[in-house]
Image (tube, rainbow, N blue to C red):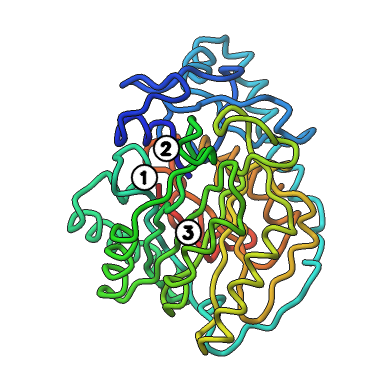
Amino acid sequence: MILSAFFAAASLGAAPLGVTPLGVTPLASPSLSISASASASALFQTTSRTDSTSGSKVHKKSSKTSSSSSKTSSKSSNKSSRASASAHSAPAEKVAPQPAFSVVPLPNAILPKKRVVVFYGNPLSKRMGVLGEYPEPVMLAKLQQEVRNFERADPATPVQPGLHLIVSVAQGSPGKNGMYRLRMTDSLIDHWCKLAQSKGYIIFLDVQVGKSTVQAELQPLIPYLKRPYVHLALDPEFSMHHASEGVVPGRKVGVMDAAEINYAIKTLADIVAQNKLPPKILVVHRYTQKMVTNYREIRPVPAVQVVMNMDGFGQPWLKRDSYDAYERMQPVQYYGFKLFYKNDKPMLTREEVVKLKPSPLFITFQ
């Protein structure tokens, strides 16, 4: 996920959401991060406490909070450490429920035979993720190194490399159509699809609907999704509907319901059937309880494999707690985990990631 406001300001000359060359003004309590979706700690670092579930710690503490806490007494630090350990260990004692729907993977499906490792971002901004931060040759070399890292960490599971391209970018201003989202051009999308194909990669087209809809944003992507190596991702954080109706993207965490996710599943399943394609993968980003509603009603099918991707950044124990709360304890089908080169402090090692329970089979680097 990214902070689209920066994209609009840096790449298009707009200045929504109070963007300055140094970032945006925090929108809520400075002690909590809005999550995973921030492309840099200076952008949308905060969110309301009401986005957290009771008893679950799912947000990253800001760098300011971390700095001030380091100055507290050792007694306070010890108490904090004990509280952190308790918070981390408690969920592991619970027995995870079974997914609501059980689907046997088809022989030509990617999951669970392989682990997918992707680089995320948008090439028009260095602040959105790895895809735009480096020249293409450097980025591709770094991705291959991460592939080797995961092959070493888990030799039993082959790695499928991929790219993760944001193609509908939520905006802090309405734009000409009033949808608070900006679609990438066909030429840009086609370039990155062909790059992925030329390397033997897969590619995910990531959608932030803003005030548009999943239905509307999928329609222009159908020609690309007919290609066997192209898959789909949805970002509920910037879906300004349901409890977030009427709010500008970035001011509040968005919401996506199972019905919208199921629409995407059906669309992908129809594309697979009509074009005799191998199964598609649908990735749904998540880092709070409320941003995905009615998760038990999300219905994977043999033609579409669903990954719920834990998309939060922060300290390792916070990320583990989030993964436990929104992945293990609320299973849908497959599990994903995002790693942030700059915002995870420190970033979990590849060996630590593959040892998470359940072991994630979709890894994103931002």
220 in relation to 75, above or below: below
Badge 3 density bin: few <14, some 14–19, many ≥20, Cα 10 Å: many
Task: Say which mark, if any, is on residue 129.
Answer: 1
Q: What residue is disc 3 on?
A: 363
174 in relation to 231, above or below: above
Mark 2 near mark 1, Cβ–Cβ under 8 Å? yes
Q: What residue is disc 2 on?
A: 39
Q: Is residue 128 left or right of residue 195?
A: right
Instruction: Name the residue at 71% across, 63% down.
Output: 332
Which of the two discs, 3 and 1, labels the residue nearer the N terminus? 1
Which of the two discs, 2 and 1, labels the residue nearer the N terminus? 2
Of residues 261 and 171, the one drawn nearer to the viewer in this rendering: 171
Q: Is residue 337 left or right of residue 194?
A: right
Of residues 313 and 85, the one drawn nearer to the viewer in this rendering: 313
Provide residue 359's location: percent of width, then percent of height. 58, 63
Amino acid type, label 2 = Ser
Which of the two discs, 2 and 3, labels the residue nearer the N terminus? 2
Instruction: Tell me which corner region of the image, top left, top right, bottom left or bottom right, holds residue 118.
Output: bottom left
Amino acid type, label 3 = Ile
